[in-house]
């Protein structure tokens, strides 16, 4: 699953998702993913800042699996 597929899957479940690359941030924290709302519930929120898009995607998938909202379930 790639970033766009995950974003589409989450949007279909009412979640808001942001993937961001920020060249002004220090190396190691230039990529960010935020997921909130929808199938996660109003109080759930995930934000990770990591070195790569792949690392953010993996962290997001792990978070979703822990919340039992996995696209692989």
Image: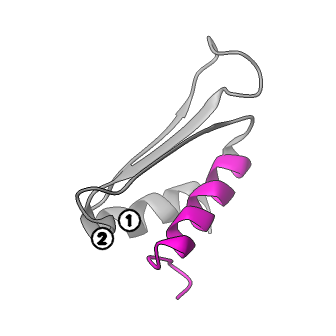
Residue 64 belongs to magenta span: yes
Q: In the rendered view, would you say 26 is above or below 40? A: above
Residue 24 belongs to magenta span: no
Q: Which mark is residue 10?
A: 1
Q: Residue at x 64, y 16 (%)?
A: 23
Q: Secondary structure at mark 1?
A: helix
Q: How many marks?
A: 2
Give coordinates of residue 58: x percent, y percent.
68, 59
Marks 1 and 2, Cα distance to the nearest angstrom?
8 Å
Give coordinates of residue 65: x percent, y percent.
55, 74
Quarter of the image where one finds residue 42 = bottom left
Mark 1 or mark 2, which is nearer to you? 2
Q: Is residue 35 left or right of residue 48?
A: left
Give coordinates of residue 63: x percent, y percent.
55, 63
Which of the pair 51/67 is nearer the observer?
A: 67
Tags 1 and 2 in contact by the CB under 8 Å rule?
yes
Q: Is residue 33 left or right of residue 45?
A: right
Chain-order first, disc 1 or disc 2:
1
Q: Residue at x 57, y 57 (%)?
A: 60
Quarter of the image where one finds residue 26 = top right
Q: In the rendered view, would you say 37 is above or below 32? A: below
Q: Main secondary structure of the magenta part?
A: helix
Give neighbour class at mark 2: few <14, some 14-19, many 20+ (Cα, 10 Å).
some
Quickly name the residue at label 2: 39
Which portion, as a residue range, is magenta? 54-73
Which of the pair 64/12 is nearer the observer?
A: 64
Give coordinates of residue 44: x percent, y percent.
34, 57
């Amino acid at each position: 699953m790639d970033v766009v597929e995950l974003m589409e899957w989450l949007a279909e479940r009412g979640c808001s998702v942001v993937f961001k690359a920020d060249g002004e941030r220090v190396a190691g924290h230039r990529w960010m993913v935020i997921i909130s709302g929808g199938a996660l519930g109003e109080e759930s929120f995930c934000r990770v800042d990591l070195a790569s898009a792949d690392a953010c995607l993996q962290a997001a998938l792990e978070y979703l699996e822990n919340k039992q909202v996995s696209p692989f379930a």
